[in-house]
Amino acid sequence: MSDHVTIEDQPGGVRLIRLTRPEKKNALTGAMYDAMKASLEQADESGEVGAIVFAGVPGMFTAGNDIGDFVAGAQKPFTEAPALHFIRQLARTTTPMVAAVDGIAVGIGTTLTLHCDLVYASPAARFRMPFVELGLVPEAASSYLLPRRVGLLKATELLLLSEPFDADEALRLGLLNAVIPSEMLVEHALAKAAALAALPRGSLKASRALIRGDQADVAAALEAEAVAFEARLRAPEAQAAFMNFLLKSKPSRS
């Protein structure tokens, strides 16, 4: 497990996965991805966890990948990347998932929520998917899921231009269930997760599967993105964008 991911099993069969690396804006390392993947796998296998809540610390969900850690691991094939292993597990997890987003949610901080069954955010939430800006492509099947949630034109705007959007806009677009005051956000998400976990487990999972439909297209999109992501990861423009990021300067646009 990672020192920067805390796993708390709450009464009533609710598991809280909390990102706790505020000094780095909860930027995700390989170890953090591994810890979350293992927790999701164990939740599905145990039968004791009825719902999962993702949260950060007050005022901070996640800034996305830790670029330094990501670049250090980029010498290996992307198929071995902890981020990809987590994303695959996220898509196939059968336990209901709830997100509580407070503060920035960059990259995977936004695309993770597309796989959650319920999503709540504070008024301070700020969503952004800067994949193209970093010389990469969308991930976590967001190229498939987002257009089906918000429409093709809006998804194109958000994914290609990396345009940020706040909680009110996310609610308007149908990406949130509700906007909740920051001080009540995690408590609210835990209560909704407890309500899910209290339902008959077999009926809950069967109904969830029916609502989501055939996931073959999601899996196919995820894998197609992974192939394109690895190709772009090796390209000079991505390497330059990473270097610029690490030097604290804005990635160049071409």
Image (cartoon, rainbow, N blue to C red):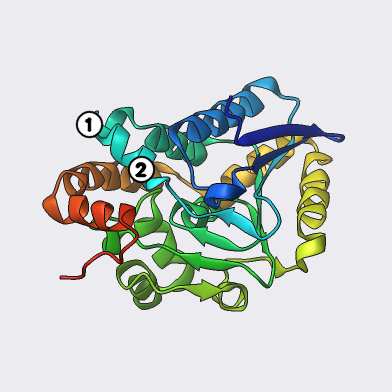
Residue lying at 49% horizontally and 30% vertically, measured from the top left: 31
Residue 52 on image: x %, y %? 69, 40
Check whether the beta carbons of the residues at disc 2 and disc 1 lie within 8 A of each other: no
For label 2, the SS is helix
* Residue 103 in the image: above or below residue 45: below
Name the residue carrying label 1: 75
Viewer can see residue 212: yes
Write down the residue under mark 2.
Answer: 68
Q: Nearer the viewer, mark 2 or mark 1?
A: 2
Q: Which amino acid type is shown beneath numbered disc 2?
A: Gly
Question: Where 10 sits versus 210, above or below?
Answer: above
Residue at 63% over, 45% down: 208
Q: Residue at x 28, y 64 (%)?
A: 133
Toward the top, the furthest residue is 46
Report how far apart the C-alphas of labels 2 and 1 lie in the structure: 12 Å
Q: Residue furthest right?
A: 11
Q: Position of residue 12 (x, y in %)?
A: 86, 35
Image quadrant containing the C terminus: bottom left
Q: Position of residue 210 (x, y in %)?
A: 58, 47
For the residue pair 68 and 123, the one nearer the viewer reads as 68
Indicate the amino acid at tag 1: Gln
Q: Nearer the viewer, residue 103 or 38?
A: 103
Give me the residue at 21% from left, 46% from top. 233
Is disc 2 surrounded by few (<14), some (14 to 19) or many (20+) residues within 10 Å? Answer: some
* Snapshot quadrant of residue 68: top left
Q: Secondary structure at mark 1?
A: helix
**N-terminal-most mark, 2 or 1:** 2
